[in-house]
Image (spheres, rainbow, N blue to C red):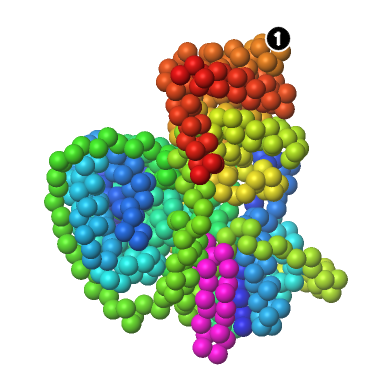
Amino acid sequence: MHVVVCIKQVPDSAQIRVHPVTNTIMRQGVPTIINPYDLFALEEALRLKDQFGAKVTVLTMGPKMADPALRKALPFGADEAILLTDRAFAGSDTLATSYALSSAIAKIGQTEPIDIVFCGKQTIDGDTAQVGPGIATRLNLQQLTYVSKIVSIDKGARQIVVHRRAEGGVQVLRTSLPCLITMLEDTNHIRFGTMDDAFRAARYQLTEWSATDAGVPDVAQCGLRGSPTVVKKVFAPSAKTVKASPIAGETPDALAKTLIDTVFTAHPGLQEDLENQIAISTQGASS
Amino acid sequence: MTEQATTRPAGRTVELDERLAAYKGVWVFIEMERGHVHPVSWELIGEGRKLADRLGVDVWGVILAPPGEANMVAAGEAYAHGADGVYLMEDPILADYRTVPFNNGLCTLVNQFKPEILLLGATTLGRDLASAVATTLATGLTADCTALAIDLDTRSMAATRPTFGGSLLCTIHTLKARPQMATVRPRVMAMPPRTAGRTGRIVNVPLNMREDDIITKVLDYIPDRDQEQAQLAFADFIVAGGRGLGKVENFRLVEDLAAVLGAEVGGTRPLVQGGWIGAERQIGQTGKTIRPKLYIAAGISGAIQHRVGVEGADCIVAINSDPNAPIFDFAHYAIVGDAVKILPALTEAFRARLSANRKSI
């Protein structure tokens, strides 16, 4: 069994700052991490390594600076790591990104056929959740998004049963391999790698692929040129024209009273709505 | 693609080439799962109506579902909320959501009737489907939009969404492909007024697939036991906490106030990541979008990620010790101070006020 895990190096969003004057992102000094959602995908892949002896290949696309993310994935127990990097990929939107990644995955599969491609649910910098399904569509893989659990895999029959999160419930789906799975968050816990894995990772030589190495058929479909979406404007949200009314008080108690008086005066009906709500919730609690 | 398309000089006002100009009208995917229409569909019809009026075109709902009476009911609701017509694709294969038949059906409709704009809810179903359709059609898709507008110069949709982990907004256009696709999270757009008796046209189109050709099978559907997720999104009163609370024990203060108000509790992404609250309680772009009558935010700084999730609230009360916290840019009432000290005072004051009122009735 061979599984490929797509990961992305992202800035640690908790530490991003916006320049107060120019309103541009200050990237300098912002530490990078593996997209946290991708770790659920990686752990699920490593469990298939435990269970079936699957080979785990991690793949990322990005500038050369993205190799730390791949380096960090190896000590967890990944076997191979490929960095897809080329100037031609610069400025890719999700459509162009899925094109480049699916080309590379097809190339990986030529040497050793792939059973499952794993992705995180989404990234924390883009938050689109579009690249995983994009890869599945391009490679004609069965698409299983928001998977909360792999119930079973029948290697002989090449079938897999999963739980997929839907609105208001969980779908139990059965499909055939190969498939693409995007893992839901909080479904597992990334392991501590072994010492062997740590040593191996330290010595490991990353594979670096250009567009040509990855066998990308049409470079015009990559990068800015291959991206149908165009970012026209990036801006900071404007403050409301009416500023928030400050509420103050000598003591917290006085402040609380002032707030309630002010809010109830400005929003007539709110007090009655609250009374009704409390009546409903007490009823619910006692029934 | 035609040769001319690539050699045409760049300019601000781009005349749509013939291929793109053939795409007309605004479509909204009406999300029906197990006979139930997700309300985000009506919110999008309301938004689609505004875009269509600006373009001078019609709004169409698209229903992919198994045959049944629910479909005509849904079509009627689509008209009542502002749609001019509905494309209806009925087939038993469409009983449960699966990517392949839904992608196939929606792409068939798009290729046949050529809409210029296609909107879907940013639900688990909508995001799964939108990505597959945009990839199949090789067109642009903008996720989780918080505002949609039309740029008449280019006759293109301006789709605004938060970017870079939620610190900035960006406006995205799809200039050289159609349809222009976008997803919008539930509750981000206001529910349009419902006009009873409004009618529309229905166009039936067959799916033309065989169940045997579809590899993925739905074995079972396990409904959620609790409706917590729905409760938070639709709650009228919400109290939420952020990192400004300091430590996990202090989250109890948020729960105490919520209990007195009969309110739901929520929190920011860092609280979910820190394990203080479950993911179903997260408010913000990657959590729930809320539209309560009263929202009390304690120790929340108000990054855009959070802002876009709460801006629809009628009344926002923010408590934060930093007078420059961005939350004060969009809150209605600002309390500069330590939430840990102020929350218990608020709890007591509300308890006194509301119970006093109840006795006087």
Q: How many marks?
A: 1
Q: Residue at x 23, y 73 (%)?
A: B208
Write down the residue under mark 1: A250
Query: Is B42 situated left or right of B299 in this image?
Result: left
Q: Tell me the amino acid under the disc marked 1.
A: Glu
Residue B261 drawn above or below residue A158:
above
State the predominant SS element of the stretch in magenta.
Answer: strand
Question: Does residue A75 belong to the magenta stretch?
Answer: no
For disc 1, the neighbor class at 10 Å (few under 14, some 14 to 19, many from 20) is few
In the foreground, A134 or B248 = B248
The residue range painted magenta reads A141-163
Which residue shows up at 56% across the image and 49% down it? B280
Residue B35's place in the image compared with B235, above or below, is: below
Residue A85 visible in this rendered orientation of the protein: no
Residue at 15%, 55% (x, y): give it. B202
Residue A202 in view in this figure? yes
Residue farthest bottom in this picture: A156
Q: Residue at x 63, y 62 (%)?
A: A187
Where residue B283 appears, as percent x and y from the top left, is 55, 41
Coordinates of residue A276 in the picture (x, y in percent): 45, 29
From the viewer's side, name the closer residue of B306 and A102.
B306
Residue A151 is one of the magenta-drawn residues: yes
Question: Toward which corner of the image does residue B334 lie, by quadrant?
Answer: top right
Secondary structure of the residue carrying tag 1 is loop
Image quadrant assignment for residue A26: top right
Q: Nearer the viewer, residue A52 or A20?
A: A52
